[in-house]
């Protein structure tokens, strides 16, 4: 039986992963944790945890007899540029604390199995941008990307030196409707839906033809659980796996939204996030993930747009200015 701790449970991935893990392992076996008060989700237990507090992590792991940890607490690319030192500390020391926790638990019971998210941000301007290979030039130019690349090296180091079963995905930009945009460069592709449903012209902070790798949340959750369920001896990558979903640019996304909401309009006011996006890949080669653990994305742009529009109206009515009937 697994006992799973999800740190960063109130965030974009965390809030949906907790529900998926609770459905799979039982709500009583998932402990959601974050630095603030709990959000609503399927876990029965919630703990306020600062991932920078190593002693508290050790105490919680002992109290709940934790066997797996998902360490999702991080600052994303655009927010991290506003506070580089804070981002470095949270992103790096947070991961190190969890890897150390996994190792130390091995001294009293079994080492913990760990999931940690990397990102397409670990690549940089000299990376081949089309079908970016698993192994290639990695010269990230954001503090977020640098923390992701360093984190990947740490994961592989802890696997090789201490045998820690750590698994990771280089997520594309994740699109979802349950939590509002959270400081990422790819988040234009979430914010655009809020504007569309409010009947506003969307001021896009990226240029019209800025193509980026993206993935819809259900595919991202499926990939995460597929990787965590894969037999350890099938995994050839212990840094982080390339995973592809779909690739599109703001103009292409706006076109599909317009097909569903004919009055929708977009205009372009690129800001500092344009340079970040321009340094990232446009599409990913995920052959190794496909071969090692059977990954294949399922969701296309048409489905994503229709599903986002339908669900945002239901899950975020106040954010998009809808009044709910009493
Ligand atoms: C961001 O835009 O910062 C994230 C990411 C690609 O890791 N969504």
Image (cartoon, rainbow, N blue to C red):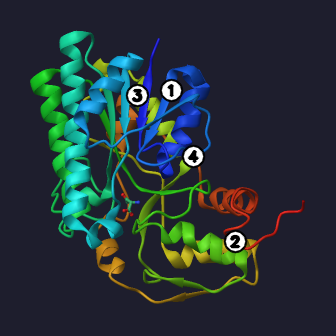
Task: From the image, tell me which residue sits under label 4.
Answer: 39
Disc 2 within 8 angstroms of ligand 1 (CB): no
Which is more foreground, mark 1 or mark 3?
Answer: 1
Disc 4 within 8 angstroms of ligand 1 (CB): no
Q: Is residue 82 above or below residue 89?
A: below
Where residue 69 sits, quadrant-wise, is top left
Looking at marks 3 and 4 on the same chain, the residue that comes earlier in the sequence is marked by: 4
Where residue 201 sits, quadrant-wise, is bottom right
Residue 30 - label: 1
The residue located at (76%, 80%) in the rendering is 262
Question: For mark 3, does the 10 Å Cα neighbourhood hold few (<14), some (14 to 19), or many (20 or more) residues?
Answer: some
Q: CA distance from mark 4 to mark 1?
A: 14 Å
Looking at marks 1 and 3 on the same chain, the residue that comes earlier in the sequence is marked by: 1
Residue 280: x percent and y percent?
30, 66
- Residue lying at the far left in this picture: please name it: 161
Residue 137: x percent and y percent?
15, 58
Looking at marks 4 and 1 on the same chain, the residue that comes earlier in the sequence is marked by: 1
Q: If the picture is divided into quarters, which one holds ligand 1?
A: bottom left
The residue located at (71%, 78%) in the rendering is 198
Which is more foreground, mark 3 or mark 2?
Answer: 2
């Amino acid at each position: 039986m697994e006992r799973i701790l999800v740190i960063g449970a109130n965030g974009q991935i965390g809030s949906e992963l907790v529900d998926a893990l609770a459905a799979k392992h039982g709500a009583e076996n998932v402990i959601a944790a974050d630095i603030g008060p709990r959000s609503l989700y399927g876990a029965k237990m919630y703990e306020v945890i600062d991932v920078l507090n190593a002693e508290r992590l050790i105490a919680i792991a002992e109290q709940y007899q934790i066997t797996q940890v998902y360490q999702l607490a991080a600052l994303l690319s655009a927010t991290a540029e506003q506070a580089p030192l804070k981002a470095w500390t949270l992103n790096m020391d947070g991961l190190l604390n969890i890897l150390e926790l996994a190792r130390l638990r091995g001294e009293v019971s079994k080492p913990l199995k760990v999931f940690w998210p990397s990102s397409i941000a670990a690549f940089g301007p000299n990376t081949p941008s089309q079908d970016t290979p698993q192994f290639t030039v990695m010269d990230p130019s954001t503090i977020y990307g640098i923390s992701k690349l360093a984190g990947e090296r740490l994961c592989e180091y802890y696997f090789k030196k201490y045998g820690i079963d750590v698994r990771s995905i280089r997520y594309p930009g994740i699109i979802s409707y349950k939590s509002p945009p959270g400081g990422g460069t790819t988040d234009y592709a979430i914010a655009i839906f809020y504007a569309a449903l409010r009947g506003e012209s969307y001021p896009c902070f990226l240029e019209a033809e800025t193509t980026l790798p993206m993935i819809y949340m259900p595919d991202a959750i499926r990939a995460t659980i597929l990787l965590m369920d894969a037999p350890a001896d099938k995994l050839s990558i212990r840094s982080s796996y390339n995973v592809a979903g779909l690739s599109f640019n703001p103009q292409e996304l706006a076109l599909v939204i317009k097909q569903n909401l004919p009055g929708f309009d977009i205009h372009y006011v690129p800001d500092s996030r344009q340079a970040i996006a321009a340094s990232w890949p446009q599409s990913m080669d995920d052959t190794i993930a496909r071969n090692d653990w059977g990954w294949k994305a399922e969701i296309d742009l048409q489905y994503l747009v229709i599903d986002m529009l339908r669900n945002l109206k239901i899950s975020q009515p106040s954010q998009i200015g809808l009044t709910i009937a009493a």
